[in-house]
Image: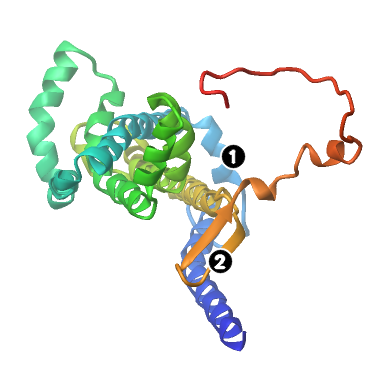
């Protein structure tokens, strides 16, 4: 018990030190954004924060970056999540090959990537569209290694093969199996990957700049050359937004109640439903054997459940 107390104290001390260390630059940026235009120490003002909603190109850049982040998240998880699950269940021998393919973008510098895809984007801009949303394709490649590692870790820590076989035995369809069984199990990995994708897309500068697109970072760079206070204020908002997303992840985790501990088999049984109030608890107290009750059939399923 004393050792657990010391471990907790050490953990909170590390969190406090690291948090304070990371908070100093944010506070410095916040203080700079409150300074008057042109510098000086004549007090603090909210001028830069009031300018943000009035600057049309900044609003457009923020909307574009958020739209790109949403498109990238949807594209990555529509393509990667089912593929990873399928490989994990059906083709475990090619997991190393898939990991190699997904991690290749980490070894390619952004400038080299731009040189390779520039002719493709020139063709797209001439014959298809000039929309900056076309950046979603190259951003998906940029985000792929990080989302893959997040999802792969979630798969490795979950026994989805047992869940898959049990659900199939009970007659669950493929859609129900994915939506109600596997996806909730991988929820933490999916949310981690989504936050990483948002952070990477919001912070990307090189590719958009070299391809002549106006995303958030390119716009901040240009605004910062004339009004650094506004650029820093928007950067503070972006950082706080990502930090809030990171705080959402642990609070969204499902709590579980320990039902049984088997020391011999080294097994712990956990339950989720036990944390919720039993809807029948108040009813059963007033119902006795041979009583006549009225009920409503809410659903009939093919497997009888």
Q: Which mark is residue 261?
A: 2
Q: Residue at x 8, y 37 (%)?
A: 115
Q: Residue furthest right?
A: 286
Mark nearest the camera among 2 and 1 is 2
Q: Residue furthest front?
A: 290
Instruction: Answer with left or right where residue 160 lies relative to residue 114.
Output: right
Q: Nearer the viewer, residue 257 or 255?
A: 257
Q: Residue at x 18, y 51 (%)?
A: 106
**x, y percent for residue 252:** 56, 48
Q: Secondary structure at mark 2?
A: strand
Quarter of the figure that contains the N terminus: bottom right
Q: Is residue 178 above or below residue 273?
A: above
Q: Residue at x 42, y 45 (%)?
A: 195
**x, y percent for residue 273:** 64, 45
Q: Is residue 98 visible?
A: no
Residue for badge 1: 50
Q: Disc 2 versus disc 1: distance between alpha carbons? A: 58 Å
């Amino acid at each position: 018990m004393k050792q657990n107390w010391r471990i907790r104290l050490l953990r909170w001390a590390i969190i406090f030190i690291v948090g304070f260390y990371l908070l100093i630059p944010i506070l410095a940026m916040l203080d700079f954004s409150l300074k008057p235009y042109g510098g000086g120490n004549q007090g603090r003002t909210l001028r830069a924060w009031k300018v943000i909603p009035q600057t049309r190109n900044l609003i457009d850049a923020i909307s574009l970056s958020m739209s790109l982040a949403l498109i990238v998240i949807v594209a990555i998880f529509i393509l990667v999540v089912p593929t990873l699950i399928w490989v994990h269940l059906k083709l475990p021998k090619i997991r190393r090959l898939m990991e190699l393919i997904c991690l290749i973008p980490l070894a390619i510098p952004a400038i080299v990537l731009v040189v390779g895809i520039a002719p493709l984007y020139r063709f797209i801009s001439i014959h298809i569209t000039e929309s900056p949303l076309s950046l979603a394709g190259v951003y998906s490649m940029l985000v792929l290694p990080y989302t893959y590692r997040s999802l792969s870790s979630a798969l490795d820590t979950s026994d989805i093969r047992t869940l898959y076989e049990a659900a199939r035995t009970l007659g669950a369809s493929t859609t129900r199996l994915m939506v109600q069984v596997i996806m909730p199990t991988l929820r933490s990995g999916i949310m981690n990957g989504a936050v990483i994708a948002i952070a990477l897309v919001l912070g990307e500068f090189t590719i958009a700049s070299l391809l002549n697109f106006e995303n958030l970072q390119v716009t901040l760079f240009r605004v910062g050359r004339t009004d650094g206070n506004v650029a820093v204020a928007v950067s503070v908002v972006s950082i706080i937004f990502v930090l809030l997303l990171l705080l959402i992840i642990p609070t969204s985790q499902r709590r579980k109640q320990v039902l049984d501990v088997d020391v011999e088999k080294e097994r712990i049984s956990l339950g989720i439903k036990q944390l919720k109030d039993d809807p029948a608890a108040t009813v059963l107290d007033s119902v006795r054997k041979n009583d006549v009750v009225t009920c409503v059939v809410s659903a009939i399923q093919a497997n009888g459940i």
